Amino acid sequence: MVGFEIGAVPFNPDGWGPPDSATAGLSVPNHPSNVPFAPFSRSEKLGRIADWTRNMNNSGRPGSKQGGYHGADSAFDFSGDDSFATLAADEDSSFRLVDTSAKSHHHNPNRPKFNPRWRFNPHHARSQLPQRRDEEQEAKKRDAEKERARRDRLYNANRSQPQRRESSVFKSSVDIQPEWNMLDQIPFSSFSKLSFSVPEPEDLLICGGLEFYDRSYDRITPKNCRPLERFKSRNFFKVTTTDDPVIRRLANEDKATVFATDSILSTLMCAARSVYSWDIVVQRVGNKLFLDKRDGSQLDLLAVHETSQEPLPDTKDDINSMHSLSVEAAYINQNFSQQALIRDANKVTFEEPNPFANEGEEVAPVAYRYRRWKMADDMYLVSRCEVQGVVDINNQRSFVTLNALNEFDPKYSGVDWRQKLETQRGAVLATELKNNANKLAKWTTQALLAGADMMKLGYVSRVHPRDHFNHVILAVVGYKPKDFATQINLNTSNMWGIVKSIVDLCMKLKEGKYVLVKDPSKPQVRIYDVPQDAFDNDYVEEPLPEDEQVQPPAEDADGTEASAAVDGAAEDKEVAKEVLAAA
């Protein structure tokens, strides 16, 4: 094996580098004697590149300051240094710094190397083609200027038209009567600090039936979209807590202390994200507490662009007004939840049929899970939770919730779904989370309450921005509710902390009827003491302003179902009536 021999390394006590061979008595092999160490070519890396300790007088040289030569350059000039010997001096005599003065260029140095008017000229290709790095820098500058201009436009639009947004939002969901007594008001800022852990819930009863989710909808793309169908014959139910026969039965059996629905609980849990006004009726009966919604309540509709900074039109006839979009979103959501199912005889049935269906009528397949949570040693909460479908995963049946986001006009969101859904789906979801934070949080909360294993979000858009009757499904994306909750910063402990604090507050009230109202202009909720006959059929009130509410005919006011049947422009008011008349 060949060895590697390391020679002796001399030590220089007087400075850097090897010692003087004469004084140290050492000789460097293959090194001529009496020759100073200096590089023999400019390409060699050894040697000095600058000596800042020297101050040479270069005023008389041809390359003086008057000729463009700077004094600092003397640090790089070793032509007068004897240590370089004549070889280095000869080499330095032929070395000159590059002259970067403006007179050496044939074009104007102040002119940018690349601008939007630049065109390729084959005759001057070599001199005029910009460098790649310059192109990238110029492109970044142009993008930054466009983004700055866009932000300025939005800022100026919001400053010049603040009343449009306020006029749409600053309306109470319920008409506050003079005889109502305000008991308390709770700012949303206090909700963020609340936390309460609940054990896993138990199922008391499951009613209704489910159809299987059609997995082919997972493969839908904007280029391969499907039109949204209309389900005229299937009935949907939005029954409040105290009108639910199953909840009445459970209350009589003393199964719990507090009773609610997933829609009402999710509204409370996500209250801090809400902008529009909402209200929940609280009934204190004996030692029990019932959380209800009013007939025709805003909770039956789906807010659109609630948390957006872009103002919506406040004209009552505009198809993009707040109320019109809410009705349209409810209609889309109902139809999508039916279209994404396999409509055949293979259904999953449960212990009891749909408790709200009349004999012989066709109902939308849905499962109602009556679940119970332990809030304290002597307090339980029962809620009716909904799931819309079922799917087989690894030979195990899993519950699925189906909801649809709707695009009405790309100008309001700034993101065109047809262009971005395939390549930038994350950007589309981020925009929806910004514009519809409350709605997405409520859907996620409802999926968590129902114990769903998967939540499917459909992206439904209008065929044309001015046609609010015909829609297409552009994509369907599935998420696990727990993972999605983490993604949108939804804290389960905080959600239950809000419910626990509201329940504890209401349990301290005397028996009677109360209403929780989200302030239309401030992030807070108020509690009013209302008469016992408030919100009954003969009680006069205006849940929404006259110019926005579509009043149902008297003969249908007590109906218990809402059908999402739409057959063109003539049926718009009919759809609004049926959705709002849901009991």
Image (tube, rainbow, N blue to C red):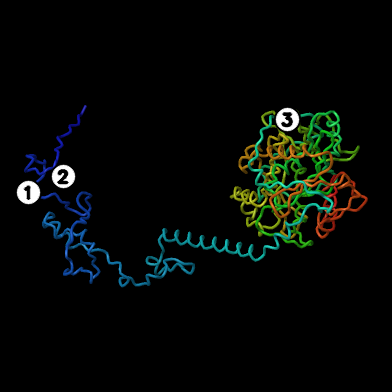
Pointers 3 and 2 in contact (C-beta within 8 Å): no
Residue type at numbered disc 3: Lys
Q: Amino acid at mark 2?
A: Gly
Q: Residue at x 15, y 37 (%)?
A: 9
- Circle 1 sits in a helix, a strand or a loop, which is it? loop
Q: Which numbered disc, 3 or 1, marks the residue that appears first in the sequence? A: 1
Among the two numbered marks 3 and 2 on one chain, the one whose residue lies closer to the N terminus? 2
Q: Nearer the viewer, residue 207 or 461?
A: 207
| Residue 117 at least partly seen | yes
The answer to whether 198 is drawn above or below residue 275 in the figure is: above
Three-letter amino acid code at the position of disc 1: Asn
Image coordinates of residue 485 in percent, x first then y, are: 64, 40
Query: Circle 3 sits in a helix, a strand or a loop, which is it?
Result: strand
Residue position for label 3:
374
Is residue 458 among the parts visible in the rendering?
no
For disc 1, the neighbor class at 10 Å (few under 14, some 14 to 19, many from 20) is: few
- Closer to the eye: label 3 or 1: 3
Q: Tell which tag, 3 or 2, sits nearer the viewer.
A: 3
Q: Which residue is disc 1 drawn over?
A: 34
Crowding at label 2, few (<14), some or many (≥20) Cα neighbours within 10 Å?
A: few
Mark identifier at residue 514: none
Q: Residues within 10 Å of mark 3 (few under 14, many from 20)?
A: some
Q: CA distance from mark 1 to mark 2?
A: 20 Å
Q: Which residue is mark 2?
A: 15
